[in-house]
Image (cartoon, rainbow, N blue to C red):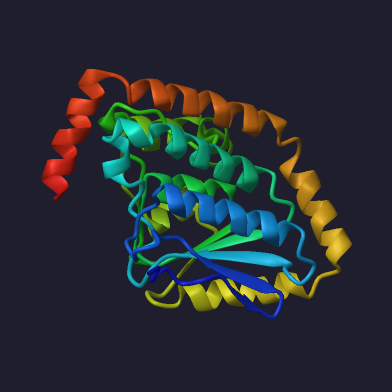
């Protein structure tokens, strides 16, 4: 039985929780598929004008499910689900906001680069340890991160694996607003209501112009996923992931 909070429509705002179906702050194959389905449906639902992503209490998302990385029988379905979810997010036509209250790690952080605004509590942290795991980043962040953070900021964040605190993330451009701990969701919903009152066509057209051509993002998502899949077939990388998984257990 799923204990994952279901998407909730509040006025014209769809609130979506980023977590696994069994209530963990990670994304597994089922969670990727569920997110993709939710965004597909929201894209054609006129009642939905804005989507707000949130995490579980005290944590946004700790990344992908390591058990699926280490199980070769799950790789094909995992890769398909990840690709569909990020291509769907990259081409989603409506504003997406995120409220981060806690840690955003790995894919729990790269998903934020597709959001139009990220609101974080002051105690939140952001980290992308892909290189430390022997992997490459996902979600077209090899394009989006230099655009948002600048090349030097993106290099430090992804290649050194630096942890960014909320104010640092705001200074670099990943976070739009920093609020008191526990109030990120309220602040995000306020912004969503403001956007929901705007003339719909003008809002969507303006956002589309600002986002530009998304074909390059989809191509890069496919390229990153291919490299990610190759890494999961490398014995040295798998041993590293197994060691990290044991330490985290």
Viewed as shown, does residue 164 lie left or right of 33?
left
* Viewport quadrant of the N terminus: bottom left
Viewed as shown, does residue 201 lie left or right of 5?
right
* Position of 242 relative to 3 (above/below): above
- Residue at screen point 18% across, 42% down: 245
* Position of 109 relative to 228 (above/below): below
- Residue at screen point 75% across, 46% down: 210
* Position of 199 relative to 20 (above/below): below
The x and y percentages for residue 49 are: 74, 67
- Residue at screen point 81% across, 53% down: 206
* Position of 200 relative to 105 (above/below): below
The x and y percentages for residue 6 are: 51, 71
Q: Which of the 4 image quadrants contains residue 94?
A: bottom right
Viewed as shown, does residue 197 lie left or right of 137?
right
Is residue 177 visible to us here? no
Q: Which of the 4 image quadrants contains residue 44?
A: bottom right
The x and y percentages for residue 53 are: 53, 63
The x and y percentages for residue 16 are: 54, 66
- Residue at screen point 41% across, 60% down: 19
Is residue 236 visible to us here? yes
């Amino acid at each position: 039985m799923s204990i994952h909070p279901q998407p909730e429509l509040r006025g014209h705002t769809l609130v979506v929780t980023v977590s696994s179906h069994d209530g963990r702050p990670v994304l597994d194959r089922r969670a990727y598929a569920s997110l993709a389905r939710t965004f597909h449906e929201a894209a054609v639902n006129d009642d939905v004008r804005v989507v707000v992503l949130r995490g579980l209490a005290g944590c946004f998302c700790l990344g992908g499910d390591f058990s699926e990385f280490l199980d070769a029988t799950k790789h094909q379905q995992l890769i398909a689900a990840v690709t569909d979810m990020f291509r769907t997010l990259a081409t989603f036509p409506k504003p997406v906001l995120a409220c981060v209250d806690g840690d955003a790690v790995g894919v729990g952080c790269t998903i934020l680069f597709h959001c139009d605004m990220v609101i974080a509590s002051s105690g939140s942290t952001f980290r992308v340890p892909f290189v430390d795991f022997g992997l490459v980043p996902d979600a077209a962040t090899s394009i989006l991160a230099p655009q948002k953070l600048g090349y030097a900021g993106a290099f430090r964040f992804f290649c050194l694996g630096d942890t960014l605190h909320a104010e640092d993330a705001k200074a670099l451009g990943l976070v739009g607003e920093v609020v008191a701990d526990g109030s990120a969701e309220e602040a995000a919903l306020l912004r969503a209501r403001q956007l929901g009152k705007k003339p719909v066509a003008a809002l969507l057209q303006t956002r589309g112009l600002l986002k530009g051509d998304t074909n390059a993002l989809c191509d890069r998502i496919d390229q990153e996923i291919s490299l990610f899949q190759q890494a999961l077939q490398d014995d040295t990388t798998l041993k590293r992931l197994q060691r990290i998984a044991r330490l985290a257990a």
